[in-house]
Amino acid sequence: MISTLAPAYAVENAASGRDGSCPSAAAAKTAVTVVRGDGIGPEIMEATLRLLEAAQAGLDLRQVEMGKAVYERGHSAGIEPSAWDSIRQTGVLLKGPITTPQGGGYKSLNVTLRKTLGLYANVRPCVAYDPFVASRFPGMDVVIVRENEEDTYAGIEHRQTAEVTQCLKLISRPGCERIVRYAFEYAKAYGRKKVSCFTKDNIMKATDGLFHKVFDEIAPQYPDIENEHWIIDIGAARLADTPNDFDVIVTPNLYGDILSDIAAQITGSVGLGGSANIGPTAAMFEAIHGSAPTIAGQDVANPSGLILAAVQMLTHVGKPEVAERVHNAWLRTIEDGVHTPDVYDGSVSRQRVGTQAFADALAERLGESPKKLAPASYAGRKPLDLPATQPAAKPKKELVGVDVFIDWDRPGRKPEMLAIFLQSAAQHLGMKLKMITNRGVKVWPEGLPETFCTDHWRCRFVALDGGPVTHGQVTALLGRIARQGLDFIKTEHLCTFDGQPGYSMGQGE
């Protein structure tokens, strides 16, 4: 079994009594790495830490620097080795928003942290607090569970021709299994009734199709939890229109990034959204919003997103009672109409306060519970304990062809002319040119003259007899294509797995 608690944290706490069982605040201190961040980050982090101190959270805060200043010192990832060391030691990171400099050469620190630390599950609760924060959807309470490491966020992109660039979408079976199972285990632990899967597998049949397939395999293992699948476009429309139809949503990385911001905004404000990034050895907690540099230093930023992320952190490190106390103080403050400028509404708000005064108001209400909003309850809450993914049986893999991508920009761009060159290259190799596509549309044979073509062509070769081909045949083919004066820029092997095609099929195949 894999616990979402980091081993370093578990070992350290076992040795020092930091597992929450000791009533002494000193004995219960939990090591947490803290990054104040950029823009409004230092302000909202200060408010959050002051509140945690008032709540006697028992945290051993280890502050490190990341972000803009580190980028400017020449570290393209925005993080130095000492910060990595601290995160690996504590296993827990509470992070303010980071500004990624615009322009080439700089990496997104959030993506770097998530992928390097294996933080595969991004958990974003999206809750409406109507009528105290205006929302069209009173009672909305949706949790987005987003796969956090794969998909187009692998960041593998290439410019291949003068006109065409590509981004690779990578989806793995273990990645799908981990995030889908996490969503169901989360639903089980938090008393949720339904898990909805969002994909676009009617178009991306291999990648999104795998995600949907794994969802369908795992869902029956949780018979007490309803399950359903939505195509992402209509699912997103339904989420925006009738969010109360949903409970927990699990989805690949890109869709989850977009959906969670939409869901947070329609609750009333994206500024109220907290986010947990969970992996087997570490976890990171942050607000879902950015660094908002235009309002930095003005004491107007809403620290709620980071405070609610800290609540998630407290449950993760085994302090559910403190999490409950902080969360209920936050709910009571919102209910009492003490609001920051972003959610202030004269019809319901009673007091307009700045960042630090909002934290003070929460501290004054520690130990209180909301009167109208549903109170938070984390009693007995433990980190999810997930089974390790099991390696799948290896299918029989057979090479049956190759897609060769060509940069070709002859006048008129007639695919028939390109086909003549390619057919000549394949002669006497036991292979044949089966089709040519341009941006996924078949243009040879039997293409239509109306089809718009760029300088980027996919040319599919298969065995003459329909059987397997060898790597030797493929390399010989590429040599002949090069001698024809054609610029091949990429190849993709066409393989079957237990006899089933592992590649998208063209028209007529």
Image (cartoon, helix red, strand yellow):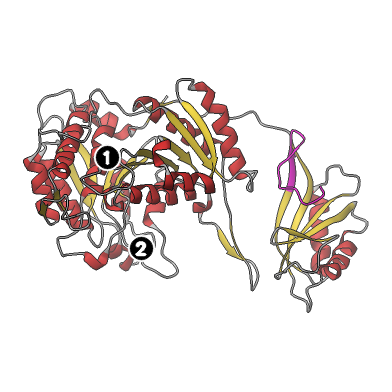
Q: Position of residue 471 (x, y in %)?
A: 78, 49
Q: Nearer the viewer, residue 504 or 102?
A: 504
Give the numbered dot on residue 100.
Answer: 2
Label 1: state its secondary structure. helix
**What's the distance in space between the residues labelled 1 and 2, CA to CA?**
25 Å
Magenta span includes 236: no
Amino acid marked by disc 2: Thr
Can you identify the residue that label 1 sits on?
90
**Residue 251 in sight from this viewpoint:** yes
x 30%, y 34%: residue? 8
Residue 457 vertical position relative to residue 278 in the rendered view, above or below = below
**Residue that appears at 57% across and 30% down:** 216
Q: Could you tell me which secondary element the residue under label 2 belongs to?
A: loop
Please give the name of the residue rendered at 39% of the width and 63% of the height, measured from the top-left corner: 76
Q: Dot 2, crowdedness within 10 Å: few (<14), some or many (≥20)?
A: many
Q: Nearer the viewer, mark 1 or mark 2?
A: 2
421 in relation to 355, above or below: below
The residue segment tinted magenta is 494-509
Q: Position of residue 388 (x, y in %)?
A: 47, 28
- 502 part of magenta stretch: yes
Q: Which residue ends up furthest to the right in the rendered image?
A: 428
Front one among 488 and 145: 145
Marks 1 and 2 in Cβ contact (< 8 Å): no
Amino acid type of the residue tagged 1 in the rendering: Thr
Dot placed on the residue nearer the N-terminal end, 1 or 2: 1
